[in-house]
Image (tube, rainbow, N blue to C red):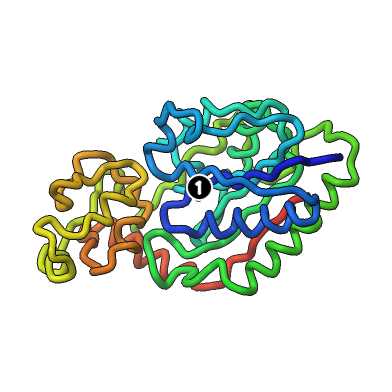
Amino acid sequence: MKINRVYEVYFSPTGTTEKVVTAIADVMAKILGCRTDCFDFTLPQARTDSDAENSFPALSPSDLVVFGCPTYAGRLPNLLLKYLHTIRGNGAFAVPVVTFGNRNFDNSLIELRDLLEAQGFHTIAGAACSCEHSFSRTLGAGRPDTEDLTEIRTFSGQAAEKIRSAESFLSPIHVPGVSAEENHGGYYQPRDRHGVFIDIRKVKPLTDREKCLAFSSADDGCGICAAVCPMGSIDPSDITEIPGICIKCGACIKKCPAQAKYYDDPGYLYHKTELEEIYTRRASNSFFL
């Protein structure tokens, strides 16, 4: 089967999903003898821009899309779903890819596969890769690392050979998880040691103004946190204010050069510590062909 172009498409607040998707797409494009293009929909303007040059690419049946999203609470980020239901596959092939923070990908991969199929893609392979957790610098630290990338590139080569040698794909790629008919199993709910639900949905990061201003000569700080927020939730004129929704993606914290962003919510900190203590093992990547 002839593929004319491979697209890297991803939502990647801290860069780990981008790293995985790019590694897969580069290998597949090389084997398939075609070029790669990129569509990064992490920032809000990419999901709202009416300019055709900056909007979701117009795909065709000769295109292949490596489509990546992180796992949040065992599912796709729910605030992305409205946007994701606007994209069109137009018969293009797709490799759904999810990343997860060393715990589990639960039902995020099957949810992404089902969504892509519903939007007109033909899924031919899939992957779930362990990465550094958005809450932590120690949980899955540094992943995807060299060992991960070796596994990812091996899978990518196998996926490329699969599509190159096949004449057609009649069924979606089989991946584990709860189907759409059962609402993909709901969302993972953190609980304390007594089994009480920890609700961190409305928790937002704080700013150490002294650290922020010490790093930047500007009166309002360097503004990086506002610029990298995938929800556009941080006020660029006062980065201590977060009038919008926080999805706990970690972008403002991990990309702050002054390390001035932090959480102090007891429930959030309890959950973070619990994850770091329980999931210290090296979680395995999963590949489906």
Q: How crowded is mark 1: few (under 14 residues within 10 Å), some or many (20 or more)?
A: many
- Relative to 49, 69 lies left or right: right
- Relative to 178, 42 lies left or right: left
Q: How far from the left and from the top, in percent, is residue 285?
A: 64, 61
- Relative to 135, 93 lies left or right: right
Label 1: state its secondary structure: loop
The residue at 35%/56% (across/down) is 251
**Vertical relation: 112 (above or below) 128:** above
Q: Report which quarter residue 170 is drawn in.
A: top right
Q: Report which quarter residue 217 is drawn in.
A: bottom left
Query: How many labels sit on residues?
Result: 1
The residue at 56%/66% (across/down) is 144
Q: Can residue 227 be seen?
A: yes
Q: How far from the left and from the top, in percent, is residue 270?
A: 30, 62
Quadrant containing the N terminus in the rendered view = top right
Q: How far from the left and from the top, in percent, is residue 246?
A: 29, 45
**Vertical relation: 123 (above or below) 144:** above
Q: Report which quarter residue 256 is drawn in.
A: bottom left
Q: What residue type is labelled 1?
A: Gly
Q: How far from the left and from the top, in percent, is residue 185?
A: 54, 38
The residue at 25%/49% (across/down) is 203
The residue at 66%/42% (across/down) is 65
Q: Mark 1 points at which residue?
A: 74
- Relative to 192, 126 lies left or right: right
